[in-house]
Image (cartoon, helix red, strand yellow):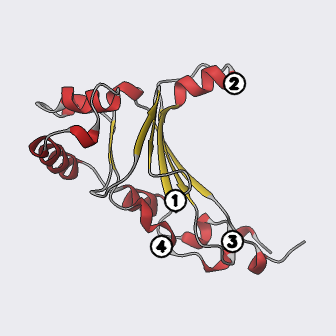
Amino acid sequence: MIEPERWKVSRLDVAFDFPTPYEDCFLLPPPTNLKINRHETTIYYGAAKSACSVCQYDKQKQLKEVKGIDSVPMTRIEFRLKPKQKPLTRYDKEDFIKMKGFRFVSNTNEFTGLRCLLKSVTNGKRDWKSLKRRDKQAITAAVKERTVDMLDLFLEYIEGDIDGFMHLSDVP
């Protein structure tokens, strides 16, 4: 077996499953010039070949269509990280920094006055880039006030232990 110091990662997916119907949630991207594409009930943030792309989709629908499994309503946020290849033992917080700035709203019903706008972006009736500046500012302020940054959520979940997350503690 190849020793762990020589293992390399070409792509690392970090997925969050939220028990929320797809149409009732919203993902706020960081204030960058991200390419945003939509395909039915899937939204892609960032180019496929970039260092980080994010996929938001209806996991309940995917489980039913692909595996024939009935599940509770579920939305998946999937970060597809393509770090610079280096030994697995040398990963740290900086390798996940591209997750910073994304914020997930699990229930748009809690956003009085913005609910319709948030749902229209998620459901494809409106495009984030075409929203008026004041609408983007109102959404951003409300979302930041009530949600946690996805990188912080990830680090909290793994208790800041990148080595443990990369399963290095399981390696002899």
What residue is rendered at 15% in x and 50% in y? 141
Which residue in the structure is indicated by mark 4? 93
At label 1, the amino acid type is Ser
Of the numbered discs 2 and 4, the one sitting upstream in the chain is 2
C-alpha gap between disc 2 and disc 4: 34 Å
C-alpha gap between disc 4 and disc 3: 17 Å
Front residue of this view, candidates 83 and 130: 130
Which residue in the structure is indicated by mark 3? 169
The tag on residue 166 is: none
Q: Are marks 3 and 2 in contact (CB under 8 Å)?
A: no
Front residue of this view, candidates 171 and 57: 57
The tag on residue 67 is: 2
Q: Position of residue 142 (x, y in %)?
A: 16, 45
Q: Secondary structure at mark 2?
A: helix
At label 3, the amino acid type is Ser
Front residue of this view, candidates 58 and 171: 58
What residue is rendered at 67% in x and 25% in y? 66
Of the numbered discs 3 and 1, the one sitting upstream in the chain is 1
What residue is rendered at 61% in x and 26% in y? 63
Q: Residues within 10 Å of mark 1 (few under 14, many from 20)?
A: few
Depth-wise, is mark 3 or mark 2 nearer the camera?
Answer: 2
Which residue in the structure is indicated by mark 1? 50
C-alpha gap between disc 3 and disc 1: 30 Å
At label 4, the amino acid type is Lys
Depth-wise, is mark 1 or mark 2 nearer the camera?
Answer: 1
